[in-house]
C-alpha cells in the first residue's frame, strides 16, 4: 500500500523567496521518500532593505504580496494539504518585519513564522543531512544565506556545536561585515574543530549549489579547496555582465556568488577541510521534513 502526501514549504530569505512542493511517499516496511515536485524561486532581495535602511520598502512589500498570492494559488493547483512559511534574517531584522507578516496574513491568508538563526540551523539539520553523515567522520556544515550563515559541527553522527553569525552575501555586498565578525568566525571554527582530524565540509545554499553544478561533478563527489579557490579567482576576473552572459547565472546570483564562495573558502581554511560535499538540502527541505516529523 502506497500513500502520497503533498507538503509545501515557503522560505523567505534575504536574497530570494522560495516555494518547494514535495511529494511524500509512504510505503509499508520502506523508508519514506521525499520527492521534489516543484521549486519556484522569486528574486526579491529583502536584505537590501533590511540591512541598509532597517525596513522593508513599500515596493518590496507589494512584490512579496504578489509572490505570496502566486504561491497560494500554486499550492491550490498542486493540491498541497499542509504547508509552512518561514522567514529568516531580513524579516527578523527589519523593524517592520512583523508588520509585513501581518499584511501577508491579511492579503494572502498565509501565516509567516519569523525564525531565529538557531531554529534555522535546527530545521536545516532535520533535512536529509543525517543521511550524508558517516558516524566515523567529523563534518562542519555551512549554510550561507543572504543575511546570516549557520555553522554546525557534527561528529559520530551528532551535532556537537552550532552557531549563527550575522554574515551573509547581501550584507557582504553592502560592506556591512566587519573584520571583527570574520575574526569571531575564525575563532569559533578553530576552537570547535581543533580536536578533530580530517574535518569534511558540507555546504548548502543556492550559491554553493550553483558552483557545484558548474563543476559538472556527480552528486556524491566533493569539491576540493583548490577547485573552489580557482573558481573564486575566475569569478572575480569576470564582470557582473560576463558572469550572466558566459556562466548563465541569474541576475540576482551573479553578484552574491563571490562573497558566498569567500565564506566557504575561509571555512575550509580554518577547519583544515580539503573536501566540500554539496548535498541538495536547504531550509525549505528542512521545513517539509520537520512538518512531517511534527517537530515544528
Image (cartoon, rainbow, N blue to C red):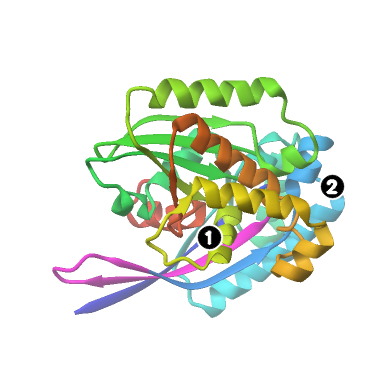
According to the picture, the residue beneath numbered tag 1 turns out to be: 212
Crowd band around label 1 with a 10 angstrom C-alpha radius: few (<14), some (14–19), many (20+)? many
Q: How many numbered tags mark residues here?
A: 2
Q: Nearer the viewer, residue 188 or 121?
A: 188
Q: Position of residue 215 (x, y in %)?
A: 54, 63
Q: Nearer the viewer, residue 102 or 247?
A: 247
Q: Is residue 70 left or right of residue 85?
A: right
According to the picture, the residue beneath numbered tag 2 turns out to be: 57
Segment tinted magenta in the rendering: 15-34
Per the image, is 19 magenta?
yes
Disc 1, SS: helix
Disc 2, SS: loop
Q: Quadrant of the N terminus?
A: bottom left
In percent of the image, x 39 and y 54: which residue is there?
291
In percent of the image, x 61 and y 21: which residue is there?
183
Q: Position of residue 166 (x, y in %)?
A: 63, 31
Q: From the image, state whether disc 1 or disc 2 is nearer to you.
A: 1
Crowd band around label 2 with a 10 angstrom C-alpha radius: few (<14), some (14–19), many (20+)? some
Taking the view exactly as shown, the residue that stands out farthest to the left is: 29
Q: Nearer the viewer, residue 180 or 4?
A: 180
**Vertical position of residue 121 compared to residue 8: above or below:** above
Q: Is residue 288 left or right of residue 111?
A: left
Amino acid at each position: 500500500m502506497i500513500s502520497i502526501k503533498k507538503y509545501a514549504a515557503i522560505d523567505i530569505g534575504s536574497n530570494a523567496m522560495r516555494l518547494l512542493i514535495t511529494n511524500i511517499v509512504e510505503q509499508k516496511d520502506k523508508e519514506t521518500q521525499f520527492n521534489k515536485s516543484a521549486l519556484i524561486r522569486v528574486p526579491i532581495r529583502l536584505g537590501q532593505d533590511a540591512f541598509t535602511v532597517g525596513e522593508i520598502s513599500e515596493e518590496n512589500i507589494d512584490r512579496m504580496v504578489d509572490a505570496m498570492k502566486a504561491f497560494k494559488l500554486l499550492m491550490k493547483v498542486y493540491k498541497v494539504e499542509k504547508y509552512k512559511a518561514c522567514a529568516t534574517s531580513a524579516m527578523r531584522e527589519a523593524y517592520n518585519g512583523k508588520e509585513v507578516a501581518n499584511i501577508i496574513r491579511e492579503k494572502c491568508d498565509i501565516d509567516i513564522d519569523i525564525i531565529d538563526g538557531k531554529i534555522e540551523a535546527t530545521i536545516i539539520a532535520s533535512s536529509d543531512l543525517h543521511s550524508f553523515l558517516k558516524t566515523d567522520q567529523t563534518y562542519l556544515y555551512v549554510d550561507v544565506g543572504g543575511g546570516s550563515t549557520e555553522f554546525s559541527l557534527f561528529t559520530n553522527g551528532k551535532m556537537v556545536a552550532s552557531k549563527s553569525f550575522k554574515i551573509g552575501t547581501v550584507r557582504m555586498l553592502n560592506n556591512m561585515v566587519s573584520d571583527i565578525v570574520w575574526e569571531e568566525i575564525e575563532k569559533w571554527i578553530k576552537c570547535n574543530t581543533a580536536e578533530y582530524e580530517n574535518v569534511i565540509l558540507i555546504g548548502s545554499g543556492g550559491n554553493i549549489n550553483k558552483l557545484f553544478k558548474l563543476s559538472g561533478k556527480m552528486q556524491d563527489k566533493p569539491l576540493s579547496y583548490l577547485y573552489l579557490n580557482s573558481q573564486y579567482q575566475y569569478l572575480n576576473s569576470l564582470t557582473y555582465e560576463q558572469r550572466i552572459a558566459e556562466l548563465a547565472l541569474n541576475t540576482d546570483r551573479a553578484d552574491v556568488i563571490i562573497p558566498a564562495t569567500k565564506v566557504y573558502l575561509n571555512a575550509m581554511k580554518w577547519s583544515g577541510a580539503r573536501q566540500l560535499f554539496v548535498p541538495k538540502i536547504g531550509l525549505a527541505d528542512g521545513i517539509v521534513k520537520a512538518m512531517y516529523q511534527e517537530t515544528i
